[in-house]
Amino acid sequence: MGRATRKPRSSRAAGSPKAHRPTPQAPAARVPATPAGTPPAAQLPPDPASAEAVLVLHYTRLARLAYTVLPSSLDRHRRVLAAHALVQRALPNRLPDLLRTRQPGVPAPRRSSEGTSAPIDPAYAHLRATVLSAALREAPQRPGLLPQVWGLRLFPASSGTEGLALERELAGLSPAERAAYALLTLEELSPASAGELLRVAGVEDPDGALRRAEALGAAHSAQALLAPDFDPCTVHARPTDLLRRRRRLRGTAAAAVLAVAAVVTATLTLPGGGGPTAAPLPTVRPGSEVARAVAAVVRVPDDTWRHTARIDFTAWPARGDQLHDQALIARALTLWSSAGQLQARRGLVHAEPGTTSAPPAQSPRLLWAGRVDGASVVLLDDGSRLARYTRPDRPTGSDVEQLDLSRSDESDVTTAGAVLLRSTAAGDRFLIAPWVDTVQLRDLRAPNTAARDLSPVDGLTPDVAAPPAQGCASWPVLQLRSSSVIAEHHAFLLTDLGGITAAHLTFTPPPQSGPANYPREATGSAALVDWGRLGCSLPALRGQDVKSVNAWEFADQQLPENQGTAAWTCTRADRWDGTGSAATQFLPPTNDPAATATTTGTQPQGRACSRYEQYVVADTWWRSAAGRSYLLAAGSRHVVSMATQGGLSTPASAVPSRTMALPVPARPQAAVTVTGALDTGQTARSLG
C-alpha cells in the first residue's frame, strides 16, 4: 500500500520553534542526489561565524530534534545532556584547511528538492543534517563526551497524558523511525525530502521508517511533539545522592574543580572572548536564516513619536550610517541571543544590576547602527531592555567587542531622552530622543553659569565632557527641551552615571501649607542651587543602573545665634529594576560656590523618601561661628514633635516642632538617636 501524502499543518503550539525556519516546502516527487556537476563550493560546510549565528538562533529547535531521535534506553537526564552535546558539537570549528572536505554522512547544501526554486539555508541545512546523523550513529550506545552536571538530575517538564503516551510509542520505534517522525513533524518536511535526508544519513530503509512515522503522526497531533516533554532546553532540576555526596565532599574537591573546567570546555564555544580581538562578522547570504533574522528587526518610522501617546523607546526611529550593514546587526543579534552563556566571559557581555541576560523576548527594534568615535555601535530594544553592541576598529585591552544590556521598561519622555552610545577619553557621545528640540550642556556645580548649546547630528551629540572619575569640582549634565508637540516649555536634566541610559535629575521644593509638593524638573534657580551642592553625592551612584535621582528639600531650619537658614534634603535614587537608595543631607547657608552638602544618613536599599515612605527625620552635629556645639535635627511635614535618646547627659523632652537645636557642651561618645512623632501616631527615625 502506497504511502499517503502528509497534509501540511496549519497551526502550531505556543512556543513552537517555527520562527525563522527555512523556506516552507511543498510536496513533490523525490529527486535524485546532488548531480555530479554540482559546484564544489556548494558542498563545503558553512563558515564558523555563519554557522554560529544560525545555531544560536535555532539552538532549541536542533536540541529538540536530537532529543527526539535519541533512544529512551538513556534516562531523561542523559538524553538531555546528550542532546545538548550533539548540537554543540555540530558547530564547525576546525582549522580552515580541514573545512575543505565535506564531512562524511552530511548531505551537501543544495537547492530545494521539493520542486521550488527557493534555496535552503546552507548553514541550517548543514547543522540539521550533522545533528541528525550524529544522533542516529550514537543512538545504539551511550553518547561520548557530555556536559557535566554535578549533584543534579535534569529532566523536561511533563505536559500531561498525551506527551506521556507519545513518549511510550516513540520508545518502541527504531532510531530511524524516530528520526523520520521528527523530520515530518518538527521540521515539516515532505516525505520525499525526509526520505532523502534519512538516506544520506545512512538509514537503510527510509521508506519503511517513513511509513511507521506517518502512522504515528496520524495518531498524535503535532502539538504533542512540541510539548515541554521533548524540550531539553526547558528542564526541571532535582538533587541526587545528597548524603553520599556530603560524606565525600572533602575527598572530591579537586575532582569538582576539574568537572567545572570540563563543563566550560564542553559547552558551546563562541568567538569573541580571549584577548583584545573581535570575532569575525557572520556571512549573511540572501534568503538565509541570518538574513531573515536581520530582516525581522523592527524599524520605526521617523515621525512615529508625533502620532503616538506612548513617548518612550518604542517611538525611537532607526538612525545611523550603518543601518544596512546586515553582518554587523547579525553579530549584535547573535551576542544578545547567547548573552546568558557568554556573560561569564570577561569583557564580552555586561548586564546592569537587575537586568536579565535572556535572549530578546520578541523581534527587537533597531534604534541605531553607525560609526561612533572609532567603533561601530548597534543599539536595539525589545520593549523591556536596551542592548548596545560596540565593535571597536582597533580593539585594546580595555576597549574590546562588547554587548551591554540595561532595562528600559516603563521609560518616558525624560528617562528615554538620551542614551550613551560611546564613552572615550575624548568624552561622551549621546543619542538624543527624536522629540527633543534643543540640547544644551551645563555644569551642575556652577548653577549660575549659563548652559552651552550643542548641535547634534542625526541625533548624535558631539563629544561632551564626562563626569570626572575622581572628585566633583565640576559635573556636566545635559539640559534638554522637548518639542512643543510633546509638552510646552518642558526642559529637563540628564547625567551620565555609567549606564546605557542617562539618569534623570528632579527636585522637590520645601514644604508649604496645603497639599504636599511633588517632584518637578530640576531646571529652576532654586533646584539648580541645591543640586549645585548635592552634585558631589552623584559619584556614589555610578554603576547602579540609576533611572532617576530626586532631591527633596523636606525642611528649612533657622540656625541658632542668628546664623541664617539651613536646608535639609533627601536624595532618592530609583533604579530601573524598581529598587532604590536614599541619603539625607544638611546644607548650611554659604556664599562659597564650591561648598558641598554634608551627608547625615543613608539607606543603601529601601523606600525612604519615596512616595511609599514619605516621612523622614535627619540630624547632625553643628558648630556655630562662636564655637558653640549643637545637635540639629529636622523632620518632614507630618512630624509634630522631636526627641532624643541615647548619649546626651541631659536628654531633652519632646520639642513640639519639626526642627530641633540642642546646645551640647561636647559631642557625646555614645550614639544619640533622634525620633520624630508623626501626626498619624507613628514614629520616624533618622536614616542609618
Image: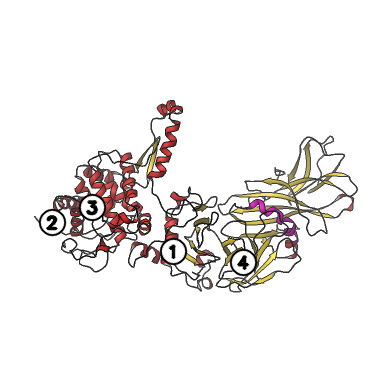
Q: Earlier in the sequence, mark 3 or mark 4?
A: 3
Q: Earlier in the sequence, mark 2 or mark 4?
A: 2
**Over which residues does the magenta segment extend?**
529-543
Q: Main secondary structure of the magenta part?
A: helix
The residue tagged 4 is: 463
Compute the Cα span from label 2 to label 4.
69 Å
Residue at the front extreme, as displayed: 97
The residue tagged 1 is: 329
Q: Label 1 amino acid? A: Ile
The crowding category of the residue bearing disc 4, from other C-alpha atoms within 10 Å (few below 14, some 14 to 19, many at least 20), is some
List x then y, in percent, for residue 502: 60, 60
List x then y, in percent, for residue 386: 51, 59
Residue 461 vs residue 15, the one in the foreground: 461
Compute the Cα span from label 1 to label 3.
33 Å
The residue tagged 2 is: 3
User: Disc 2 vs disc 1: which is toward the camera?
Assistant: 1
The residue tagged 3 is: 104
Residue at the top extreme, as displayed: 247
List x then y, in percent, for residue 309: 53, 68
Compute the Cα span from label 3 to label 4.
55 Å
- As drawn, the label of residue 192 is none
